[in-house]
Amino acid sequence: MYTAADHTFAICAYKESPYLADCVASLLAQSDPSNILIATSTPNDTISALAEETGIPLYVREGAPGIGVDWNHALNRATTPLVTIAHQDDWYDPAYKTQMLEALNAAENPILYFCDYGELRNGELVTTNKLLEVKRRLLAPLKDPAKQTSRKVRRRALAFGNSICCPSVTYLKERTPEDIFVASPYKTNLDWEAWADFADEEGSFVYNPQVLMAHRIHEESETSNLIRSGERSAEDLALLKRFWPAPIARALNHFYAGGIKSNSTDE
């Protein structure tokens, strides 16, 4: 039985985000108090001042920044059995942790937990749009706990795109390899690759269809940069080929690319 003390929000902080303080505030406002840490490979006065002001431990990783190594650093600095890698720009509902603990404690052999999410666009919470609705349809079968253990259902939910929002996920450290993201060859789809690996394991994808966090969409994000560079599309095709023959994967990638354009404040 997991308790509040068994969970940590590990915040990945990068450079000087104007949204980091809002993310921290949403974690401090959780209905169930939580362990919180900040991990960074780009230390600066903004991050240090916020950590000092809130009393949150700050862990600095030496070496060049990188999504995989930075996520791994945050994950492995936590000493609790449950860890949520919180992205610095995002927001969490006060009930996120409470509902996560309830769901995991009721689950059969859980592998990971995740919830539905909305988007923060120009400071406003958006809970429905075309991309969000497509992802909800893909995940709908996982609302049924009896289907959360099905390899076929889990793979189908991931076969048309990355339907699981990375910062909504809580990891079970006993089920998560220490080098889970470091070993990935991807810059943007390392989470989708991880979900695909998890989908082949015995256990449950514990899905909560409640919108309990929001992912901020802004042009300075690393995801936006990778979309503009074209790297995102190449990685999407590589992951789609994991589920489909190459001709089908290429056709799906054409349509998937249209949905990815929604990662823009102009949409």
Image (cartoon, rainbow, N blue to C red):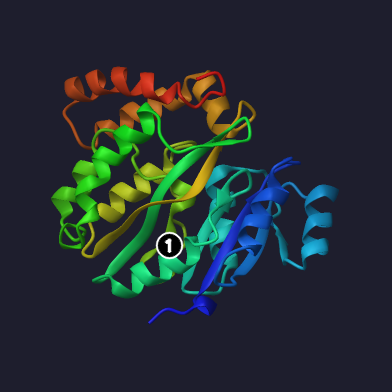
- Position of residue 261 measured from the top left corner of the image (x, y, whole percent): 45, 21
Residue at coordinates 54% horizontally, 79% vertically from top-left? 5
- Position of residue 239 measured from the top left corner of the image (x, y, whole percent): 31, 35
Image quadrant containing the N terminus: bottom left
Say which element carries label 1: strand
Question: Would residue 134 be found to the left or right of residue 169 on screen?
Answer: left
Residue at coordinates 38% horizontally, 55% vertically from top-left? 114
Q: Observer-nearest residue: 234 or 132?
A: 132
- Residue 181 appears in the picture as rendered: no
Residue at coordinates 23% horizontally, 71% vertically from top-left? 108
Name the residue that disc number 1 marks: 171
- Which residue appears farthest toward the bottom when viewing the image? 1
Dividing the picture into quadrants, the one containing residue 109 is bottom left
Amino acid on which disc 1 is placed: Tyr
Question: Would residue 187 be found to the left or right of residue 87 on screen?
Answer: left
Classify mark 1: residues with Cα within 10 Å, few (<14), some (14-19) or many (20+).
many
- Position of residue 116 measured from the top left corner of the image (x, y, whole percent): 39, 48
- Residue 13 appears in the picture as rendered: yes
- Position of residue 121 measured from the top left corner of the image (x, y, whole percent): 57, 31
Compared to 136, does 32 lie above or below? below
Question: Would residue 90 be found to the left or right of residue 199 on screen?
Answer: right
